[in-house]
Amino acid sequence: MQIIEKDFGNGYQLITLTNDAGVHLSVTDLGARIVSLGRDKELVLGFGSATEYLEKDVFIGASIGRTAGRIENGRFVLDGKVHQVTTDPGNGHSLHGGLPGFETKKWTYTIENSDDEASVIFTTISPDGEHGFPGNLTVEVRHTLTQENIWRVTTTGISDQPTLFNPTNHVYFNLTGDVTQSIAEHKLWLNSTAFAPLRQDSIPTGEKASTVGTAFDFQKGKKLAEVFASDFDQKKQVDGIDHPFFLDENDLAIPAAKLLSPDGTTELTVATDLSSIVIFTANFGTDAPEMHGKQLANHGGITFETQTAPGAEQYTDFGSIRLAANEPFETITEYKLAFNPTAN
C-alpha cells in the first residue's frame, strides 16, 4: 500500500492511501475526515484545502460527535439528572454535539501499513463539560483502505463518567464524479422498512413509520429521481431526504445499502453494525458550495451516516446512546466499491 503525506493548509495534513488496484483514500487531521475516495474519478464530495472546509462547510466528510443529529432543546436526562448542552441559535436545538465539535478539532494521528490494508488512526479527547456533556471522552477514528476496495471506519470511545455518545461520519457520495450533476439518476437500495418522520424543525416525532408503499421505500431499489418527483409529505418538507432509516438487519456481513451510478459502472455497498442510517440528499438548493472550481448541484450528493437514530436520548424505541463510565464503545462501518459490477 502506498502512503503519501502532504500539507493541507492552516497547519493540517492530508494523508493519502492507495491500494494495488489504484483506489485511493485521502483523509485529514482536520475533523478526522475523508477528503477523497476513488480510482478513475472522484466518488465523494470534498474541498481542496483545510481553509475551504473551515470557510464553506465544516461537516462534509467529517467525523461527527459527541452526538450525531439534533437533541431537542439541547436537554436530556441521564441517570436521573437533567443536562443542558449548547444549542444552535438558529433553531434552539443541539446539533452534532455542539459547535464547534469533532469536525473542527485537530486530531493527532498515526499510520499503520501492511500488505492487505493501511490505516490512519486519529485520536482526540473531548473534555468533561465540553458543550455541557459529562465525562472526559477519549475517541479514536480509524480510516482503513483494503486491497479489496473497502473503506472501513472503526470508531471507539471511552469516558470516565456516564455520558451520551453517538458518532458518525458525514460522507457524501456522488458516483458520477461530477459535482454539477445531481444524484437523481443514482439507484438506491436500502435494507430498511421503517424510517423516522420529522417535525418541521427536523426533530423526530418519535414514531417508527413504515416505508412500504411510500416514496421512501427502497427495498427493491429505485432511482432517487422518483423520490424527488414525488408529493410525499416528508419529502416535500425537506425537499428530498434528510431522515433516519431503521435497518432491518445490522450486521457487517449483510448489506445495509447499495448505490449504483447512473451508467452502471460503479457500485457502493454499505455495511454496518449500527441500527440506522441517516440519508441526506444534499438538499442545498442554490446555496450549495463550490468544489474544485465547480458549483455543487442541488441534490449533488447523498450521505450514509451510520448511527443510532437521532432522538434516541428521549425515544427508547430508537435504541440507546448512553455510554457507561469506563465501558469501551466500538462500531464499524464498511463502504465497499465495485467497478463494472455484473449483477444489478
Image: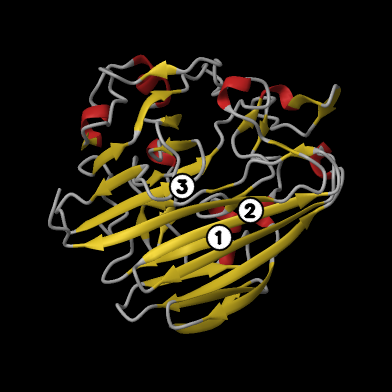
Residue at 51% across / 48% down in the picture? 170
Q: Identify the image quadrant of residue 32.
A: bottom right
Label 2 to label 3, Cα distance in Å?
21 Å
Q: Residue at x 42, y 16 (%)?
A: 209
Q: Residues at badges 2 and 1 in contact (C-beta under 8 Å)?
A: yes
Q: Which mark is residue 194?
A: none
Indicate the amino acid at tag 2.
Answer: Glu
**Based on the displayed image, in which of its 4 quarters is residue 317 positioned?**
top right
Residue 116 located left or right of residue 27? left
Q: Residue 268, how many percent across, how many down?
A: 30, 53
| Image coords of residue 62 (percent x, y) | 56, 54
Looking at the rendered structure, the number of numbered marks drawn on it comes to 3
Which residue is denoted by mark 2 in the rendering? 103
The residue at which mark 1 appears reads as 33
How far apart are labels 1 and 3 at the CA level? 18 Å
Q: Helix, strand or loop at disc 3?
A: strand
What amino acid type should be assigned to the residue bearing mark 3?
Answer: Thr
- Res. 243 in view: no
Left or right: where does residue 209 sit relative to residue 205? Answer: left
Instruction: Indicate which label's residue lies in the foreground, 2 or 3.
Output: 3
User: Please, is residue 87 above or below residue 161 in the view?
Assistant: above
Q: In the image, residue 310 lies at what x, y percent? A: 58, 30
Q: Amino acid at mark 1?
A: Arg
SS of the residue under disc 1: strand
Q: Which mark is residue 272?
A: 3
Q: Secondary structure at mark 2?
A: helix
